[in-house]
Amino acid sequence: MDVTMLDAAFWMTCLAIAGLLILSGFFSGSETALTAASRGKLRSQADKGTKGAQKALDVTEDNERLIGSVLLGNNLVNILATSLATALFTRVFGESGVALATLVMTVLVLVFAEVLPKTYAITNPESAASRVAGPIAVVVLVFSPVVSFVRMLVRGILSLFGVQTDPDSHILALKDEIAGAIALGHVEGAVEKEDRDRLLGALDLGERTVEEIMLHRSKIEMIDANTPAREVLEACLKSPHTRLPLYRDDPENIVGVIHAKDLLRGMYAERDEALPDVQLADFDVLGVAMTPYFVPETTTLDDQMRQFLRRQTHFALVVDEYGALQGLITLEDILEEIVGEITDEFDPSEDAPVKSKDGGWVVDGGMTIRDFNRSTECNLPDEEANTMAGLVIHEAQMIPTTGQVFSFHGHRFEVVERTANRLTTLKVRPLRRAR
């Protein structure tokens, strides 16, 4: 073979290998940029008119197809570059060229086609994703038929082992990702505790039910509908609440909800200054009462808030599957799950956890586990019980007596006071970890 032609072929092969390594680096960097880029940031940039960001959003909509196309392109150029390098080194060095080609290509691919482009892409993934989205979209389109076949083959193989793939799983996991980012931000000091509680509270509305935050029926302030109007008026004036349920004969038989303003307006409209006592005696309280609004205890807080807004009401009575009264819930209760306790000059003071000298807290048994966690930065589970007393009863599998002590979930629980079957006061202290 002519030496000039040999030299030309040598340099052409070197240029081809270099070009393939550049392509490999492009595919590697693109994969990192498009998978690491925040879709939230890309959406923000796209809303501001950045076309590359919108293209990146479109490309990453189907991550499975994207990854398949990029890997296919990357493997093709790597295999081709390695084959050319092996042929080149074999021609120059003979049989030892195979080992030399393997060594040289491993170093070149590792440094210039993997580490370097991926390091660059990870430093600013959104910017890199916007730049590479256009060319990658063409690659995805070209390799789409092959990737579709490979995807079907892979899913078939995985199904043999009982593994089901869900291309939309990232959508379902988005809320968990946001919650995790907020919690991590709080740990690292970037998010304040109050902000964390508000954001996580808003995210949890769709997962929690009215049963978890309702006022239990044992604590509901009610008025017998047969009570004389004057006594009803006195009860409304003494109560810190503006809305009170009316029952007839049995507290389970709710016949209406009286609003203090409606009661006062009704009495004022029918007033008779000459005979006020007679007028009050004849006043029909049910005539100004609202129709009770009942909701099932399984309703999510998100749905219930929407219902409150749609019906333009703030008050609902909670019933179980048999229609038995379980409690009541207000719009304020739901909002408090986001912004924390809302109080005014008429609200009774809440029993917050009281810090004890030994590092624990004295808490009301009726306090919700969620409120306790918020106040103390503890992380007690609330899947099996809503209140602190309920958690102790669930874990103890009994109704403990005064003075009994239990240890679970990394805390020591002591029953300080019990009234009938209710645990009214508890003392909670974190267990000291053994060194």
Image (spheres, grey):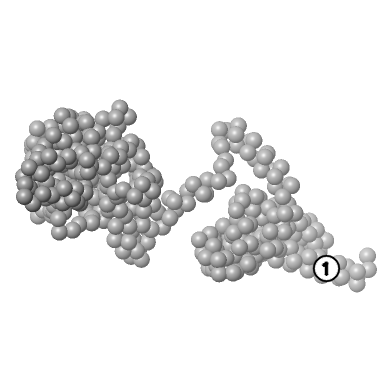
Residue receiving disc 1: 12
Residue 125 shows in the view:
no
Q: How many marks?
A: 1
Residue at position x 30%, y 53% in the image: 335
Q: At x 72% / y 50%, what residue is drawn?
A: 144
Q: Quadrant of residue 53?
A: bottom right
Please give the name of the residue rendered at 27% of the width and 52% of the height, measured from the top-left corner. Answer: 332
Q: Is residue 76 left or right of residue 345?
A: right
Foreground residue among 242 and 122: 242
Q: Quadrant location of the N terminus?
A: bottom right
Question: In the rendering, at what x and y percent does residue 15 appear?
Answer: 78, 68
Q: Nearer the viewer, residue 360 or 75?
A: 360
From the viewer's side, name the closer residue of 79 and 380: 380
As drawn, 392 above or below 85: above
Determine if residue 66 is in view: yes
> Which residue sits furthest right?
2
Asked whether, in this view, residue 138 is left or right of residue 412, the answer is: right
Secondary element at tag 1: helix
Q: Position of residue 286 (x, y in %)?
A: 20, 39
Left/right of residue 100 with respect to residue 321 in the rendered view: right
Task: Give the x, y percent position of residue 160.
Answer: 60, 32
Q: Residue furthest front?
A: 274
- Check the image and name the residue furthest to the top: 322
Q: Residue at x 70, y 63 (%)?
A: 135
Q: Quadrant of residue 50?
A: bottom right
**Mark 1 burial class by Cα count in 10 Å: few <14, some 14-19, many 20+:** few
| Residue 287 drawn at (x, y percent) | 22, 40
Location of residue 256 with respect to 266 vertically, above or below: above
The amino acid at mark 1 is Met
